[in-house]
Image (tube, rainbow, N blue to C red):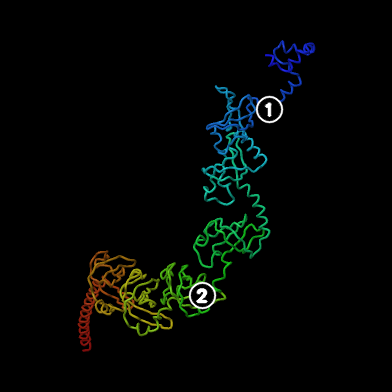
Amino acid sequence: MAETQTKTEQENQKNPEEFLANFDWHNYEEGIEKVEEEKLQEFEKLVEENFVDTADEEVVEGVVVHLTDREAIIDINAKSEGVVSLNEFRYNPDLKVGDKVEVLIDVREDRTGQLVLSHRKARTIKAWDRVNAAYDNGEIVNGFVKCRTKGGMIVDVFGIEAFLPGSQIDVKPIRDYDQYVGKTMEFKVVKINHEFKNVVVSHKALIEADIEEQKKEIISQLEKGQVLEGVVKNITSYGVFIDLGGVDGLIHITDLSWSRINHPSEVVELDQKLNVVILDFDDNKSRIQLGLKQLQKHPWEALSDDIKVGDKVKGKVVVIADYGAFIEVAEGVEGLIHVSEMSWSTHLRSAQDFVSVGDEVEAVVLTLDREERKMSLGIKQLTPDPWTDITSKYPVGSKHEGIVRNFTNFGVFVELEEGIDGLIYISDLSWTKKIKHPSEFVSVGDKLEVEVLELDVDGRKLSLGHKQTTENPWDKYETEFGVGTVHTTEVSEIVDKGATINLNEDIVAFVPSRHLEKEDGKKLKKGETAEFKVIEFNKEFKRVVASHTAIFKEQEEKNVKSANNASVEKTTLGDLDALAELKEKMDKEKK
């Protein structure tokens, strides 16, 4: 026991008076050592500064002191250390001992007396504070693009899921949203809805300011004829919009290629980089007209000098109009085949009747103007002119078969062969029928027998006739239905000022109203059969006039004439007897 005594006890035993004088009876009576007031205040200050009040619901910073398979042990300078589930650190797989993390005291002590912390809640609270601060100060924040959603993307910003509208991803239209998934990008917080805890961010807003400055710089340096590099931003049916680095310009479809194209997509594609030349712009340079084909040599300048008038060329039909077709004989070099140069026929048709777009055709160069960059071509010149030997093939009086090609109000055009058309006047279609329009007699495409009536070689005109291919029946009818002939038939129609009767299938005779009167004074009606006498026959005008009244009127006239003759004879004999008696009386008086 004596061996274990401290040095102080040994000293006290040697000097008991001094020991009693310095003995602290307060500590002896209270059982604890008395702490000086200054030291006590210093201790309380240290506790206040370094230890956390676990009753507060504030976010505090702790240090990871240990990691288990499921939990992280966090020291927050409290009475005891706290635990956080590792599930709350999934976003940070590299968490290690010594890392500082933000936590919120979730449960002060569980059943085992353990302090339970929440990193997720602390991160959310801090995240909202940081998001609001970023929004208020216009700060740029980093966000992780998690996935696509309707109308845009979901972005993780400080642990908060924010919405990135599709229109706010970039200044140019986005066609592939998936390319942004899994990327960390810079954003600007543009809207916060505190009621629904919604955050909207924008990446476009960050680059618009830079683009605006860049745009001003580009616009200030624009000059006509300047060549710039651009990117195809949009393709329309009328042209292509090019992004020149924040400034848009338009290449009209006619300035894309020296050759004709149906749609700009034949020449360019979206996001394609290409060089363009500035053709023109308005006063404030907001509308810039660009050209692509102007960067290449004009095709007419590369056209072979060997091509001349009269040469045969081959090309592809690129455009068809009613008046002709444009043929591309070399890239960017076109010639026009007028419809009149497609066939020797004088009866013009549409160009679509001869060629179609895409056809490969051969033609003859008719005119060539390199300065005006114009060329006219012809197809019919590849075949002999059918009018060369027209007099021997189609002499006047010769008969042929043709095809009805077209009508006019005054006649029919008949094609005898390709390039040889003739006209049949309406009066030369039939000997007997009265035709108001050719369509009453024939149809387009019908075959028709014709006779050449006239031939004008210089004027390239043929006059044809159809009725001349048959005998004129009116020569025969002149005898059969001449004036004075009587025919029995019925009244076919009652017309104005009379009626009509059919003497045969060709002759329709007119009966004047006063010649319809019957012997009893009544008039013939439609469908009644009677005798009719021809009182007029005109072969030239095909006019026949008949009369029923003339039948019995003629008999009456005969009867009257006979009666008159008998009366005259009787009167004459009576007069002779009276004269005889007068003479006898006169003779007696003389005696």
- Viewer-proximal residue among 83 and 556: 83
- Which quadrant: the C terminus? bottom left
Mark 1 nearby-residue class (10 Å; few <14, some 14–19, many ≥20): few
| Left or right: 501, with 278 as reference point | left
Q: Which secondary structure lies at badge 1?
A: helix
- Viewer-proximal residue among 568 and 81: 81
Rendered image: mark on residue 252: none
Q: Which residue is mark 2?
A: 375
Tell me which numbered mark, 1 or 2, is placed earlier along the sequence. Answer: 1
Residue 518 drawn at (x, y percent): 25, 67
User: From the viewer's perspective, is residue 388 above or below residue 113?
Assistant: below
- Which quadrant: the N terminus? top right
Q: Which secondary structure lies at badge 2?
A: strand
Residue at x 69% of width, y 12% of height = 31
Residue 307 drawn at (x, y percent): 50, 78
The type of residue carrying mark 1 is Asn
Q: Which residue is mark 1?
A: 50
Residue at x 64% of width, y 30% of height = 60
Residue 538 drawn at (x, y percent): 31, 77
User: From the viewer's perspective, is residue 358 above or below residue 479?
Assistant: above
Residue at x 51% of width, y 66% of height = 260
The residues tagged by marks 1 and 2 sit, at their Cα atoms, a distance apart of: 97 Å
| Left or right: 304, with 496 as reference point | right
| Left or right: 80, with 454 as reference point | right
Label 1 or label 2, whichever lies nearer to me, is 1
The type of residue carrying mark 2 is Met
Q: Quadrant of residue 164?
A: top right
